[in-house]
Amino acid sequence: MRVLFLVGLPQEPFTQERLQKENDEKRDIVQGDFIDDYHNLTHKGVMGFKWISENCKNAKYVIKIDDDVFVNIFHLIETVLPVVETHPRFLFCYTRVNNTVARNGRHAVDVHYFPGMRRLPFSFCAGPFVLIPNAIVTEMYVASLSTPFFWLDDVYLFGILPLITGNISLYHLPKCHEDPNDALECFSSKAQCDILAAFAWDEKAMFSLWNYNLRQYNERNPPPTPPEAPIKQPYPRQEEKDKEKQQIFNI
């Protein structure tokens, strides 16, 4: 498994110095030639597709997560990945269906996009957690080369590009977009929590979710009891050896 962080160009020089130091030590940063800004997340995603296409040809799948999302790795391996193996042309995510086209607010879309429409004519993946079989990543990157830019990254990367690529469907994962408080309650109170991914908006929440998750796994999968060591026979005492020798000489 390889972990990578996708970043753009920071505004402050000292941040770039820290990024360079991190990459020199860990080799875990892919940086694009664009300002790291909310409206440039689509550029960041396409950059990721390109890098994966060129450098991860042997990977089975790619998981894109936001940096404030906790993933239940045990549930992922035990429950989700077996399904992925039999669905090679699906994106696995929390799907958005019949989503409203916002014309105001943070996610406002210009009237030139989807003119006259109140709702998007296609479904897409919510971006905090998306699992992509690697076989289709290159196809989606190639589709991006001829598909006009759209700034809402979830819509573009996991809605428009799969549509343009063709023969790609979305597999809905119901519990990979959870509130951190609900996730903490689930992991701390249940013997087995089936939440796959949840937001963890601070370091404390992230560590708490991991510790509860690990405890649940260990309780379900206790380490095997080691076999009892065979009882070793004590070495004969020296006087017993001498006695045996004397008996031999007396025969």
Image: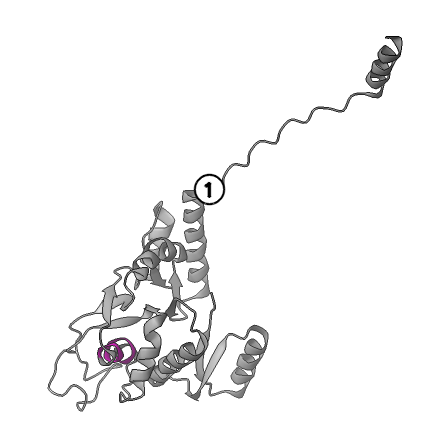
Looking at this rendering, what residue extends furthest in the bottom direction?
112
- Kind of residue sitting beneath label 1: Pro
Classify 227 as above or below 241: below
Point out residue 61 in the picture as x, y percentages from the top left corner: 37, 67
Classify 199 as above or below 43: above
Q: 18 or 149, which lies in front?
A: 149
Q: 6 or 167, which lies in front?
A: 167
Point out residue 99 in the picture as x, y percentages from the top left corner: 18, 74
Q: Which residue is mark 1?
A: 222
Left or right of 115, for residue 155: right
Q: Residues within 10 Å of mark 1 (few under 14, many from 20)?
A: few
Residue 160 belongs to the span the image colors magenta: yes
Which residue does the image show at 22% across and 70% down from the upper left?
Answer: 169
Magenta residue span? 156-163
Point out residue 214 in the picture as x, y percentages from the top left corner: 44, 51
Residue 87 belongs to the span the image colors magenta: no
Which residue does the image show at 84% across and 21% down from the upper left?
Answer: 238
| Quarter of image, res 198 | bottom left
Which residue does the image show at 83% across and 18% down from the upper left?
Answer: 241
Q: 206 or 216, which lies in front?
A: 216
Looking at this rendering, what residue extends furthest in the left direction?
116
Quadrant of the snapshot with the C terminus? top right
